[in-house]
Amino acid sequence: MISYARQTQDEQPEAPPPPAEEHIAPAPRVSVQAFCETVETAAAVQSAGEDRRLGKAHLKIQMGGMAAAIEAYRSAPTPNVIVLESDARNDLLAGLDQLATVCDAGTRVVVIGRINDVMLYRELVRRGVSDYVLAPVGPIDVVRSICNLFSAPEAKAVGRIIAVVGAKGGVGASTISHNVAWAIARDLAMDAVVADLDLAFGTAGLDYNQDPPQGIADAVFSPDRVDTAFIDRLLSKCTDHLSLLAAPATLDRVYDFGTDAFDAVFDTLRATMPCIVLDIPHQWSGWTKRALIGADDILIVAAPDLANLRNTKNLFDLLKAARPNDRPPLYCLNQVGVPKRPEIAATEFAKAIESQPVVSIPFEPQIFGAAANNGQMIAEISANHKSIEMFLQIAQRLTGRSETKKQKSSLLSPLIEKLRGK
């Protein structure tokens, strides 16, 4: 929702606190990058980042305004929210047009400007700007603008649910899901959470070297307690951008669930996390089917043999029929090239499925085994291993993020670097 003329230019820089009846809902876990032109605006944004309502957001501030933003995103993915300060009408509109060429779909833009003009407002709306705030701004103006992007009635849920499932047991679906989530968090700079749904035998805790006292079982067995605060307490932090909702991996109880057992957990995660990766066990029940059909995107992990081909084809047909308005599931081949094992070629697999695999990951037991035993990701074991690029390809396809942009030289690059330094 775009609001306009929040303040007039003759107002004081220090904005008054919001009235008692005003409620500003906290922002979810989103990444926010601000490009300021004045130290006053930068200070206001910095102060806003310390507000409790932006406590979950990752905020980064740079100087340089529009020029710095365009240069930065030539070689990096854009965040959930970009805050831009500009005081020139023509330069602002031209800069937004140029920014659109390097900006990922779904990124929301907040503009801080000094021109109180309805024609400018209409041009900004036409270009898809989410909010326009008149300078000078106070911290509460920044907080209100960012939070309202996600709390307005017409705002879309921020979370994207990605379901990863194996076509057959033992094909490495959990390993793939954990490394793809790592790529989403590290390389695409998206806040993500891995939900390990194999409560009895889940390996996410081992793979990330985490042993939290609580996890997803506490939420599933206490659905009446599930809310944002409760889920936050159950999350185990793996990196700055990656969290884990771990499985107990114990056999002291039987994990028989109804079809909608995980609905409250998924809804809460979707409302607070930009990306949720579901590590779904290889079993067929009401809740696993519901989780797959309800996901925004699906990755099937298969080994190149006949049983995997049959199961992948069955999953494809069912999910395409159940989700006619969504794109078809994606799949990848894993453990390709096992010595002395007859395999179905990727071309034959693709012909039967009528879809090409995203990637074909070779069988390399030494590095994958070392990573599993050490509680590490492949990227931590070998920074240049070829499978890391494959995990990034999968992450890009599942999240809809554009490919990593190559750095381009520019005549303004030295100036931009100086502005960043300041």
Image: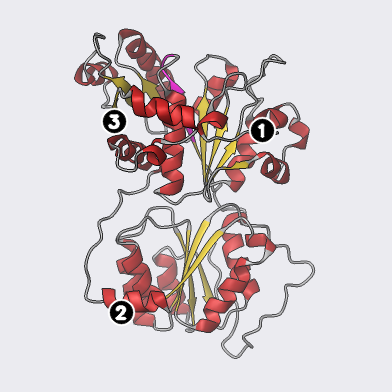
Q: Is residue 299 visible?
A: no
Q: Is residue 23 left or right of residue 57?
A: right
Viewport quadrant of the C terminus: bottom left
Going from N to C along the chain, the mark reached first, 2 or 1, is 1
The quarter of the displayed image where residue 288 is located: top right
Residue 120, picture quadrant: bottom left
How is the structure coloured here? secondary structure
Residue 359: assigned label: 3
Amino acid bearing label 2: Leu
Pointers 2 and 1 in contact (C-beta within 8 Å): no
Q: Position of residue 271 (x, y in %)?
A: 61, 45
Q: Which residues are magenta?
A: 162-168
Q: Which residue is mark 2?
A: 415
Query: Label 3 is placed on what type of residue?
Result: Val
Q: Nearer the viewer, mark 3 or mark 2?
A: 2
Mark 3 secondary-structure assignment = loop
Q: Residues within 10 Å of mark 2 (few under 14, many from 20)?
A: some
| Residue with the mark numbered 1 | 215
Q: Is residue 198 left or right of residue 416?
A: right
Indicate the amino acid at tag 1. Answer: Gly
Q: Position of residue 39 (x, y in %)?
A: 51, 82
Q: Residue at x 66, y 35 (%)?
A: 212
Q: Earlier in the sequence, mark 3 or mark 2?
A: 3
